Image (cartoon, rainbow, N blue to C red):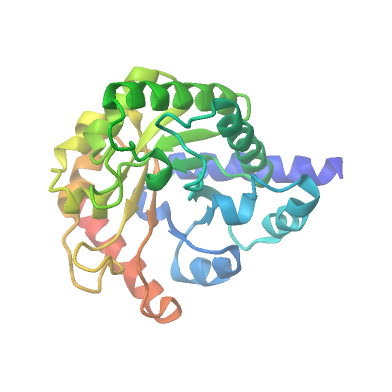
């Protein structure tokens, strides 16, 4: 058992070093289930972005999670990141916030992320962080900032990073732009707390690529999808080169996950990955 974990640790260390050394075109993954790992590998991806609630199962005992831990060890690709953190019934802002309950759930997610090799936990959770009507935005910001700081402090013990994901205003009324997310990261001021840039949400909020440069060291992860119907890159032909040029200028060293609506992922993935890589090559 000890030998297995040593091998897993060495593999993960080498993979993280690989991510840091390679170009962005070699750091592309997909938000999907682990059983798609071979498809991703064949299409030129380097990792899987899992669902935190579905795969890490923070609300379930370790015995229930054991099967997924084994799946992670046998996966065709590393599990580098995870999204869908908190369910809507765990309130992150408002009068019904219970910080102990939030942290109990969050700490399990962080610990299990470490166990399967996940380095980035995406804190989107638009419903959970939505500010209730009549509640002070200033107080909600304080609640969320405190939570992020505590999650980051715990994540540091496991070499995991929590990244705040700005979401379009139709999905949440709190943190809609990369600049707003960056302000949270700056307020927390912890190396294990950063911000995510989702190009789809940036396009929906008409946020310019300069936000990526402004985010600087706080930008730790990115998502991508086309604007009109959240299609896979390459379907409608959206031009992402302004974003890629900004990432290059910012010295971005993180990864890029495709998070989109697929018509047929098996048929579309390779073409989509190729389209992204071509735009990256034009931008770097």
Q: Name the spot of residue 45 as percent of width and height, x first.
A: 46, 61
- Asked if residue 78 shows in the view, the reply is no
Give the camera-side residue of 217 and 228: 228
Left or right, 28 with reference to 236: right
For the point 54% across and 21% down, the residue is 153
Q: In which quadrant of the rendered image does the N terminus lie?
A: top right
Residue farthest to the right, as pictured:
1
Judged left or right of residue 152, residue 71 is: right
Please name the residue shown 84% across and 43% down the image: 3
Q: Tell me residue 179's x, y (percent).
A: 22, 33
Residue 240 in the figure: left or right of residue 262 = left
Residue at x-position 54% and y-position 26%: 99
Q: Is residue 182 or residue 25 the one in the foreground?
A: 182
Q: Nearer the viewer, residue 192 or 166?
A: 166
Between 6 and 75, the residue placed more toward the observer is: 75
Residue 134 figure quarter? top left
Residue 93 at x, y percent in the picture: 40, 32
Q: Is 246 on the left-hand or right-hand side of 105?
A: left
Residue 248 x %, y %? 24, 41
Query: With respect to residue 121, does 79 lie above or below?
Result: below
Residue 225 visible, this orientation: yes
Which quarter of the picture shows residue 94? top left
Q: Residue at x 85, y 40 (%)?
A: 2
How many numbered badges does the structure rendering display?
0
């Amino acid at each position: 058992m000890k030998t297995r974990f040593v091998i897993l640790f060495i593999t993960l260390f080498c993979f993280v070093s690989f991510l840091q050394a390679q170009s962005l075109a070699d750091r592309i993954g997909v938000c999907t289930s682990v059983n798609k790992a071979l498809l991703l590998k064949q299409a030129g991806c380097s990792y899987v972005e899992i669902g935190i609630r579905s795969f890490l199962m923070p609300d379930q005992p370790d015995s229930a999670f054991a099967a997924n831990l084994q799946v992670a060890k046998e996966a065709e690709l590393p599990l580098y990141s995870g999204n869908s953190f908190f369910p809507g019934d765990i309130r992150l802002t408002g009068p019904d916030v219970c910080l102990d309950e939030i942290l109990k759930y969050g700490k399990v997610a962080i610990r299990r992320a470490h166990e399967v090799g996940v380095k980035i936990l995406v804190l989107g959770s638009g419903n959970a962080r939505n500010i209730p009507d009549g509640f002070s935005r200033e107080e909600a910001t304080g609640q969320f900032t405190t939570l992020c700081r505590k999650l980051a402090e715990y994540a540091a013990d496991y070499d995991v990073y929590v990244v705040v994901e700005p979401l379009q205003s139709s999905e949440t009324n709190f943190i809609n732009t990369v600049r707003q997310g960056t302000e949270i990261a700056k307020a927390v001021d912890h190396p294990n707390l950063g911000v995510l840039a989702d190009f789809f949400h940036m396009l929906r909020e008409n946020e310019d690529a300069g936000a990526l440069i402004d985010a600087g060291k706080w930008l730790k992860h990115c998502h991508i999808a086309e604007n009109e119907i959240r299609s896979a890159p390459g379907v409608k032909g959206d031009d992402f080169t302004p974003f890629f040029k900004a990432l290059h200028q910012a010295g971005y060293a993180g990864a890029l996950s495709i998070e989109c609506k697929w018509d047929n992922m098996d048929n579309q993935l390779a073409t989509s990955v190729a389209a992204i890589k071509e735009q990256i090559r034009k931008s770097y």
